[in-house]
Amino acid sequence: MRIAMWSGPRNISTAMMYSFGNREDFAAWDEPFYAAYLAATGIDHPMRDEVLAAHESDPQKVAEACVGPIPDGKEHFYMKHMPFHMVDGFPMDWARDCVNVHLIRHPARVVASYVAKRENPTMQDIGYARQTELFQRIPGPVLDSGDIRNNPEGILRKLCDIIGLPFDTAMLSWPAGPKGFDGAWAPHWYGAVHRSTGFAGPEGPLPEVGGAQAALVEEALPHYKKLFERRIR
């Protein structure tokens, strides 16, 4: 089985990758198209040069690897993808051979978390519009990060049942620290998850954001709500 997990940034997407990557039967790949996205758009992201130096930037080669031999001889392959990385013209046929799953989080939480790492995000940066577009092309189960944090075992068991994968309790915890499948950008973005050994507990009230950040949250909310209505409960 090949799982393509689609989400924007700051969606507990790395924790989900660690969850599946902790299974003995899974290999994991961190944002396969990130370098190709940076190369194609010229956008300035933290550690841009390091990412381009360390990762494949030809989208066709990345797409071929997504459906090529699974690393380390593993039975299954988990790929952490971001919809906005799929620039127009990038190959998408490979996704038909995957179990596509969509991971979402309330935009107020995403924006508040994102600005702590990179200032002045745009809709392109947080990916909500692109994700709803992608969902129309490659629909699949929807997970909300709040539900996972409230009940990780229950939600992961339901997901595994839906996609036909036996649940493994190894998905509920992992060793602290960096992982061999982390992308080159991990030192900038993954500090909190590197300190973790499992999913964080329930979140508190929504953070308050103002100005341009509040406007961005309002712009993203309709896209979030469309997928939230379809989430696994």
Image: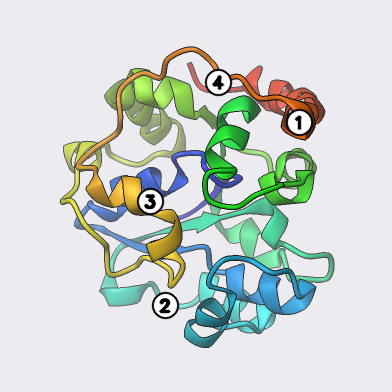
Residue found 84% across the figure and 65% down from its top: 88
Instruction: Say which quadrant the N terminus sits in.
Output: bottom left
Q: Position of residue 136 (x, y in %)?
A: 78, 40
Mark pair 3, 4: CA separation: 25 Å
Which secondary structure lies at badge 3? helix
Q: Are marks 1 and 2 in contact (CB under 8 Å)?
A: no
Q: Residue shown at 51%/30% (left/top)?
A: 143
Q: Which residue is mark 1?
A: 220
Identify the amino acid type marked 2: Pro
Q: Is residue 18 above or below residue 113?
A: below
Q: Is residue 108 left or right of residue 214?
A: left
Element marked by disc 2: loop
CA separation, marks 3 and 2?
A: 19 Å
* Residue at 82% from the left image edge and 29% from the top image edge: 219
N-terminal-most mark, 1 or 2 = 2
Horizontally, residue 17 falls left or right of residue 208, namely: left
Distance between the alpha carbons at the discs numbered 1 and 3: 24 Å
Q: Which mark is residue 17?
A: 3
Mark 4 Cα shell of 10 Å, populated few (<14), some (14-19), many (≥20): few
Q: What is the three-letter code of the residue carrying label 3? A: Met
Q: Which residue is mark 2?
A: 69
Please name which of the two marks, 1 or 2, marks the residue nearer to the observer: 1
Disc 1 crowd rating (10 Å Cα; few below 14, some 14-19, many 20+) is: many
Q: CA distance from mark 2 to mark 4?
A: 43 Å
Residue 108, x across and y down, in percent = 62, 26
**Residue 207, disc:** 4
User: Of all residues shown, which one is farthest toward the bottom?
Assistant: 53
Residue 75 or 218: which is nearer the viewer?
218
**Sequence order check, earlier mark of 1 and 4:** 4
